[in-house]
Amino acid sequence: MRIVIAGGHGQIALRLERLLSARGDEVAGIIRRAEQGEDLRAAGAEPVLCDLESASVEEVATHLEGADAAVFAAGAGPGSGVDRKNTVDRGAAVLFADAAARAGVRRHVVVSSMGADPEHPGDDVFDAYLRAKGEADAYVRAHRGLDWTILRPGMLTSDAGTGLVRLEAATGRGPIPRDDVAAVLAELVDTPATAGLTLELISGSAPVSVAVKSVAGN
């Protein structure tokens, strides 16, 4: 498979790139800064320079041509303000979805956030983040040109992955190592029967492959 990842230099994306390339997939990661390219190459991915905050749908679609799947793993990140929550967490996600559909890439996996909700109240930056992610998720769900799966991890940690997770429509809150998020994403990309599902993810007792198979087709 050829898989294109938006936000290719993110902590989850780099882990995912290593997993996908190790299993023999062709991986490209979209990045904003050329100096990030070496980290992607070390992870086995081809760096693609493109700023999703300023690019057109047509430009992004050219980078998606010929891909079998697209993964949106971009985010404005901690320390960013409300404006970038809207331009990245919402705007770039919408752009990437439209570009994937334009390029004919139906399989579309989104890294969202537990609690994402377009109606989330509050004026803090994190409130704006949850609204932006919720709006992006709603847009993707309504997109008829995509076979989408939305993954909403719990509290992300840098602990070593255990390979044991809980993956359900609603899990309740809990931590999850980024290693395990990446492992679940790799499995979801390869499991089109999870299309149309919004899934929450925390650490649990089921091996990743078992957890994904158990929700596939539901």
Image (cartoon, rainbow, N blue to C red):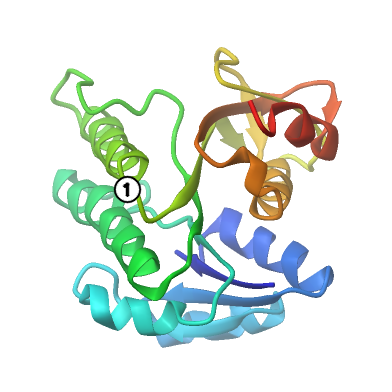
- Left or right: 180 in relation to 173: right
Residue 172 or residue 100, whichever sits in front:
100
Quarter of the picture holding the N terminus: bottom right
Residue 154 visible in the current orientation: no
37 versus 70 height, above or below: below
Residue 205 visible in the current orientation: yes
207 versus 19 height, above or below: above
- Left or right: 206 in relation to 180: right
- Crowd class of label 1 (few under 14; some 14 to 19; many from 20; radius 10 Å): some
Q: Which residue is under mark 1?
A: 143
Name the residue: 24% across, 37% down: 135
- Left or right: 175 in relation to 93: right
Name the residue: 47% across, 67% down: 105
Name the residue: 29% across, 36% down: 138
Image coordinates of residue 43 in percent, x first then y, are: 70, 74
199 versus 79 height, above or below: above
Name the residue: 45% across, 74% down: 30
Quarter location, residue 200: top right
Image coordinates of residue 189 in percent, x first then y, are: 64, 54
Image coordinates of residue 101 in percent, x first then y, are: 36, 64
Image coordinates of residue 21 in percent, x first then y, are: 75, 73
The amino acid type, in three-letter code, at marker 1 is His
